[in-house]
Image (spheres, rainbow, N blue to C red):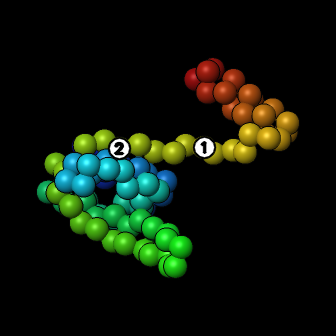
Amino acid sequence: MKEKLKELVGQSNVWLFIKSSNGWVKNAEILDVTAKTVTFRYEHETESEHRVWEKTTRINNIAEIEIKLLAVPRESKQMSDLQDRLTNLLEKE
C-alpha cells in the first residue's frame, strides 16, 4: 500500500477508503507519504460553502485506493466515438 501511495504523490482524482470513517474520500490529491503516514488534500462542498481539507492518517488506515482514469459525457456521439477508440487502444495493449 505504501509503495502505491508513493507512486500517486502529486496525482489528483484518487479515491481513498478510510477505515476509521468507513467511507470514501473522493478526488483526493496525495501530498506526502512517510514510513507510517499519508497526507492528502480533498475538497467538500455544502450549500453554504466550499471547503478544502488536508488530512494525515496512518497508512494502515487506508483500505482501498481507486484512481479515476477518464470521465466523458455520455450524450455526445463524438464522445461515444472517442470512447470506442480509447477502448480499442486499451484492448491492443
- Picture residue at 72% right of the left edge, 34% below the top: 83
Question: Reading the chain from its start, which is encountered first: label 1 or label 2?
Answer: 2
Task: Tell me residue 85's x, y (percent).
Answer: 74, 29
- From this view, report whether residue 20 is shown above or below residue 44: above
- From this view, report whether residue 25 is shown above or below residue 48: above
Task: Tell me residue 10's x, y (percent).
Answer: 42, 61
Provide the secondary structure element on which disc 1 rests: loop
Task: Tell me residue 19's x, y (percent).
Answer: 22, 48
Seen from the viewer's position, the closer of residues 19 and 33 is: 19
- From this view, report whether residue 87 is shown above or below residue 57: above
- Identify the residue under disc 2: 65
Res. 62 visible in picture: no
- Identify the residue under disc 1: 70
Q: Tag count in the figure?
A: 2
Task: Tell me residue 32's x, y (percent).
Answer: 29, 64
Residue type, mark 1 in image:
Leu
- Picture residue at 49% right of the left edge, 71% below the top: 46
Seen from the viewer's position, the closer of residues 91 and 74 is: 74
